Image (cartoon, coloured by chain):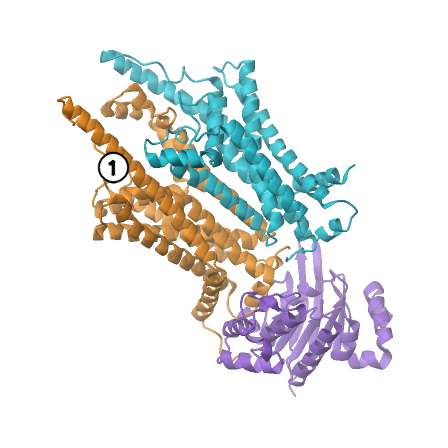
């Protein structure tokens, strides 16, 4: 077994024994379940409202528009999943990235690892391998639950193409949360104070999720975590058009929300992604850059520091 | 043996003042305040630009209608209430302010545990709850100072971005919002402090605090917001179906049970109470725009009471829970 | 003639976590003015005992009195009578020695904290460190400031938990000299330690704790009459492994 693989295996084994990680994954799984229920319940309500409204419109001699529910695709029932991936999934990934470094640092095992005969890059590779595996496992949990829910909800007709779209959505979700995991891993490697990596990555995540959407499209924080409200058109002003072009590619939360809407088929007609770079390019580029940051930082990790009260 | 036993208030003041000085020295307060000011400024400026955009669109549409010889009453004029621009800023306090408060609470506990100074303080002649009380007072002071600077910056910025000066009434509304913000952030500080003090390691405490933050501050209101049928369809279901307001209310009445459940999820979150109170006081919510403060306070005293009791309850819980001597160091 | 109240007195003092007994019922008297060395292997229960006596931990059963005050019913008076130096203390890194000490002096209710700090700095010969930030200090310097916070209010009983841990030989010697000076002032010192040489040089009585049980307790004079320093190690290892009969 290569050193990188050994480190990855040891790190993953440690994660599975960490209560906070297990609680977060259970929380994430529970929210994926809630997603399907939310979608189903809200859709039923809109459907019932439509029946009432159609009766009124017909009685008052007005034209009856088509039912918004009948126009939505089956995958749209999972529209909240993107939000929970970008909230709980990203946070779980940040915690994992932080723990991958901090656990060794607090245990005082970094000098012991550093005294072993292998390259520093193996340590970085091992930690990153553990990171992508852990976030992959989270998405696998989301995949199993959402597929099971899709086939359980009565009135939904799921086609093979839908499953392919769901798979692509989950890959996008994996890339999105892994970006923040890499940022946390790199930050934890660079900053030895307890929980610094966690705090630094959380700040990056807060800015991406709640500040950039205000600048690009005046999307307030609460709207930013609503799967429908966040897909707002850019206000028609020079400032927002400029900001949208400049910051759009960096506004990863909006990019992921747009990709979610596109892949799960609830994107408003004609809504373009913010800025000139589509999320299909921006997300992989951000993942590569975050990966390089994590690799460089963990390869330069100070292996002398550590101990329980460091 | 010392000449006199220290007074309880003296010990509490000594600890709280030391904490305040430390916060000033390590610049956490400065960075936290600057971050909140930046977030608030972004919200105010983008809100103002969007409003100016709406005004320009309205003016163009109005001119077009008048040119066609029609009346302009068919389109609603955008409202100019400067305090309404604070919507994004209040939401930033709800979310970013809450994270800063949790981290401040974590730091207050982790620092003492890491340096082993907790044991030194707890072996001084004062009850252990006095230590917790001093820390909470310190956190409250931190929130008060930080938010005061943010609100002061807002009061200066608002007339500039909106072009409308603030009245004394507006200032009073700002003070009330500041006070609610201090209560809200103190509650979150206490949560971060308590969990970081009680957890096996302070970092685990912070992780649990963040997880609770996601649940209480983001997920619970988000579920309530998402379940709102009007948020299920882009532009709103009623708007898309072109249903008049009176008919909307009749249809909504048929979903009273669903609405009660949805509201129940929302009000389980202290954040929602903070939001409802401040949105009403500042007139951000349309039904309260321009309403007299006395009327708003009468209608929203329940939200303020919840906020107060929540903070008090959390503080009481923190004071009553004994400090575990196995948690005197960072890793135990 | 009335018998003098011991500085530390425990009766059946025990601590358990569920089924795990960390400290078996401990009955022990440490007279005033003693330098008591508390020996034991790692995990023997020494730190637990100190935490019980400093009111940081509540006992499962039994009683303990420190400076005549009950730790359970009168914890504030106990805390007013003691000084405590935990193992590996770091103090407030961003504060100077003087600021750290003034803070703790105030918390201890010292009437003139500024004066008390100055006297303590002089007593410990660390006045040159007074206005330097503790974060820049070596382990030995930090330990002295830690000791300063423990004695600046002139407690009746001083608890030291592994005070020599991590110190170089010079630091150990300086600490021993300080302990001797404090002893000369009449302060009672209760010290957890691993260093038998320190026990032999500084302590007036010793106790040995093994697996939560007190297996040996006698005056240093009595020990010295029977054993030299080399044999003290044999005595310690013997009683820790096989029980008090070894010392007989």
- Vertical side of A28 occupied by B199: above or below: below
Is residue A225 among what the camera can see?
A: no
Q: Residue at point 61% right, 52% down?
A: B200
Could you say which quadrant of the image residue A217 lies in?
Answer: top left
Is residue A186 among what the camera can see?
A: yes
Task: Give the crowd class for mark 1: few <14, some 14-19, many >=20 residues within 10 Å.
Answer: few
The reply, left or right, for residue B84 in relation to residue B265 is: left
- Vertical side of A279 occupied by B332: above or below: below
Measured as percent of width and height from the top left, residue C165 is found at 71, 67
**Which residue lies under the disc numbered 1?**
B287
Callout 1 secondary element: helix
Could you say which quadrant of the image residue C205 lies in?
Answer: bottom right
Q: Which chain is purple?
A: C
Measured as percent of width and height from the top left, residue A306 is found at 67, 55
Query: Numbered disc 1: what chain?
Result: B
Chain A painted colour: cyan
């Amino acid at each position: 077994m290569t050193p990188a693989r050994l480190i990855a295996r040891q790190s993953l084994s440690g994660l599975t024994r960490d209560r906070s990680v297990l609680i977060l994954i259970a929380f994430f799984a529970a929210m994926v379940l809630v997603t399907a229920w939310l979608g189903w319940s809200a859709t039923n309500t809109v459907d019932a409202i439509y029946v009432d409204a159609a009766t009124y419109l017909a009685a008052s001699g007005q034209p009856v528009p088509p039912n918004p529910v009948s126009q939505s695709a089956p995958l749209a029932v999972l529209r909240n999943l993107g939000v929970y991936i970008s909230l709980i999934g990203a946070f779980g990934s940040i915690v994992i990235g932080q723990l991958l470094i901090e656990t060794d640092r607090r245990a005082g095992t970094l000098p012991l690892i550093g005294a072993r005969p292998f390259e520093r890059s193996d340590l970085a590779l091992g930690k990153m391998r553990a990171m992508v595996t852990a976030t992959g496992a989270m998405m696998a949990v989301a995949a199993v639950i959402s597929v099971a829910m899709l086939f359980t909800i009565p009135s939904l007709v799921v086609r093979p193409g839908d499953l392919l779209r769901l798979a692509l959505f989950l890959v996008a979700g994996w890339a999105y949360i892994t970006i923040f995991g890499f940022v946390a891993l790199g930050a934890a490697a660079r900053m030895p104070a307890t929980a610094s990596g966690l705090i630094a990555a959380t700040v990056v995540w807060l800015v991406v999720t709640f500040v950039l959407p205000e600048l690009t499209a005046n999307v307030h924080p609460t709207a930013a975590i609503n799967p429908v409200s966040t897909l707002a058109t850019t206000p028609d002003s020079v400032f927002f058009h400029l900001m949208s072009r400049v910051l759009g590619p960096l506004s990863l939360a909006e990019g992921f929300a747009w990709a979610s809407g596109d892949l799960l088929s609830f994107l408003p007609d004609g809504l373009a992604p913010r800025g000139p770079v589509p999320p299909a390019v921006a997300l992989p580029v951000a993942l590569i850059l975050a990966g390089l940051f994590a690799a460089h930082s963990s390869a330069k990790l100070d292996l002398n520091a550590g101990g329980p009260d460091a | 043996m010392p000449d006199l036993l220290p007074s309880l208030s003296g010990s509490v003041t000594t600890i709280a003042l030391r904490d305040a000085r430390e916060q000033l020295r390590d610049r956490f307060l400065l960075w936290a305040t600057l971050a909140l000011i930046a977030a608030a400024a972004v919200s105010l400026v983008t809100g103002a630009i969007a409003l100016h955009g709406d005004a320009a669109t309205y003016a163009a549409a109005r001119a077009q209608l008048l040119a066609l010889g029609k009346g302009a009453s068919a389109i609603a004029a955008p409202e100019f209430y400067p305090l309404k621009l604070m919507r994004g800023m209040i939401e930033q306090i709800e979310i970013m302010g809450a994270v800063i408060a949790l981290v401040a609470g974590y730091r207050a506990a982790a620092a003492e545990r890491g340096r082993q100074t907790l044991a030194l303080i707890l072996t001084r002649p004062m009850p252990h709850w006095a230590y917790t009380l001093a820390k909470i007072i310190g956190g409250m002071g931190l929130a008060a100072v930080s938010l005061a600077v943010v609100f002061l910056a807002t009061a200066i910025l608002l007339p500039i971005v909106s072009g409308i000066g603030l009245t004394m009434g507006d200032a009073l509304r700002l003070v009330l919002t500041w006070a609610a913000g201090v209560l809200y952030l103190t509650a979150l500080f206490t949560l971060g402090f308590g969990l970081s003090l009680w957890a096996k390691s302070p970092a685990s405490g912070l992780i649990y605090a963040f997880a609770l933050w996601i649940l209480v501050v983001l997920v619970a209101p988000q579920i309530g917001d998402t379940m709102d049928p009007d948020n299920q369809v882009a532009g709103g279901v009623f708007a898309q179906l072109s249903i008049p307001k009176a008919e909307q209310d009749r249809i909504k009445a048929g979903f009273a049970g669903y609405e009660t459940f949805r509201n129940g999820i929302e009000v389980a979150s202290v954040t929602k109470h903070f939001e409802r109170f401040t949105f009403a006081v500042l007139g951000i919510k349309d039904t309260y725009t321009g309403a007299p403060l006395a009327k708003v306070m009468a209608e929203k005293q329940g939200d303020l009471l919840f906020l107060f009791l929540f903070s008090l309850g959390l503080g009481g819980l923190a004071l009553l829970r004994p400090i575990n001597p196995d948690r005197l160091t960072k890793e135990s | 003639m009335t018998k003098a109240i011991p500085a530390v007195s425990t009766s059946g003092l025990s601590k358990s976590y569920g089924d795990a007994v960390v400290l078996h019922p401990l009955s022990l008297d440490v007279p005033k003015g003693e330098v008591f060395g508390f020996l034991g292997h790692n995990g023997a229960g020494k730190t637990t005992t100190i935490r019980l006596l400093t009111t940081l931990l509540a006992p499962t059963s039994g009683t303990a009195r420190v400076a005549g005050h009950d730790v359970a019913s009168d914890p504030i008076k106990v805390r007013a009578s003691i000084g405590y130096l935990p193992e590996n203390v770091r103090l407030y890194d961003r504060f100077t020695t003087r600021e750290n000490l003034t803070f703790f002096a105030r918390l201890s209710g010292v009437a003139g904290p500024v004066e008390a700090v100055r006297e303590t700095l002089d007593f410990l010969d660390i006045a040159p460190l007074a206005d330097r930030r503790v974060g820049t200090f070596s382990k030995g310097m930090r330990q002295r400031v830690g000791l300063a916070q423990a004695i600046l209010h002139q407690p009746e009983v001083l608890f030291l938990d592994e005070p020599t841990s991590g110190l170089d030989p010079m630091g150990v010697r300086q600490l021993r000299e300080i302990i001797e000076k404090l002893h000369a002032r009449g302060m009672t010192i209760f010290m957890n330690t691993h260093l038998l040489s320190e026990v032999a040089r500084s302590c007036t009585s010793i106790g040995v704790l093994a697996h939560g049980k007190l297996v040996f307790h006698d005056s240093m004079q009595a020990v010295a009459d029977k054993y030299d320093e080399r044999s003290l190690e044999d005595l310690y290892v013997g009683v820790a492994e096989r029980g008090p009969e070894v010392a007989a």
